[in-house]
Image (spheres, rainbow, N blue to C red):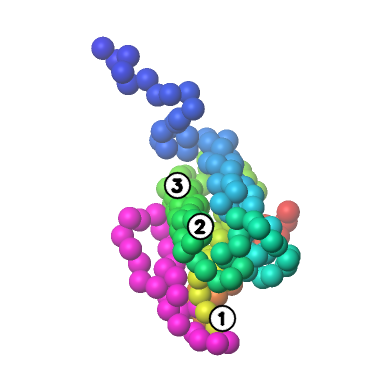
Amino acid sequence: KDWLDLEPKSEVSADVLFETPEGFSIALNGIYTSLSSTTLYGAELTHGFVDVLGRCYDLKNTQYDPLKNYDYVSNGMEQRINSIWALAYSTIANCNGLLEEMNKKDATLFKPHERARLEGEVLSLRAMLYFDLLRLYAPAPAVQDAAAIPYYTELTHVPRPEKRTSEILQLLIADLTRSKALQKEF
């Protein structure tokens, strides 16, 4: 009767995963896996997309030819741009979800240094992603301090309004300041 309720070995429910500190570390590892994908820091946000935009290389006859000419829609560029946006926000959602799960747990679940390291790390990762989203999708604040990207601090499906670049930078500074305080012993 219960044989259909078995969970696949590659998947674990959140309730089971977040019963132990090790489960939180596994979830953090999942965030790092997303970050290392070619869509994010495994290529596009390190030596691919952003380097072409920054004109770091003189490329000829590559998949990035439209991009170097500021053509953001030809040859799959629009899909590439949308994929960066989507995976960055999905990873931010995972960071927010992990922080929320940590806050639900009794303080005794973690050793004090474990919780501080984990929370600090997740705050830093979220700040890094938001900073790169600002670099790619917002005007420089010296040019125009306009509403640019939405900013989420909780796991939600409800769309948030875009915030001005200066507002987001202040939120990032707050996250990084908190992260630094949490991780100062490390």
- The mark lying in front, picked from 2 and 1, is 2
Where in the figure is residue 50, as x and y percent of width and height?
63, 64
Q: Is residue 119 depicted above or below 74 in this figure? A: above
State the extent of the magenta-drawn residues as a range.
142-165
Image side of residue 160 versus residue 53, left or right:
left
At label 1, the amino acid type is Ala
In x, y percent, where is residue 6?
37, 20
Residue type at mark 3 is Glu
The image shows residue 141, relative to residue 121, as above or below, that is below
Whichever of callouts 2 and 1 sits on the residue coming sooner in the sequence is: 2
Question: Disc 1 designates what residue?
Answer: 140
Kindly identify which residue carries mark 3.
101
- Is residue 145 shown in magenta? yes
Q: How packed is label 3: few (under 14 Cα within 10 Å), some, or many (20 or more)?
A: some
Q: Which residue is mark 2?
A: 75
Figure quadrant of the C terminus: bottom right
At 49% from the left and 27% from the top, the residue drawn is: 10
- What SS does tag 3 mark? helix
**Is 112 included in the stretch rendered in magenta?**
no
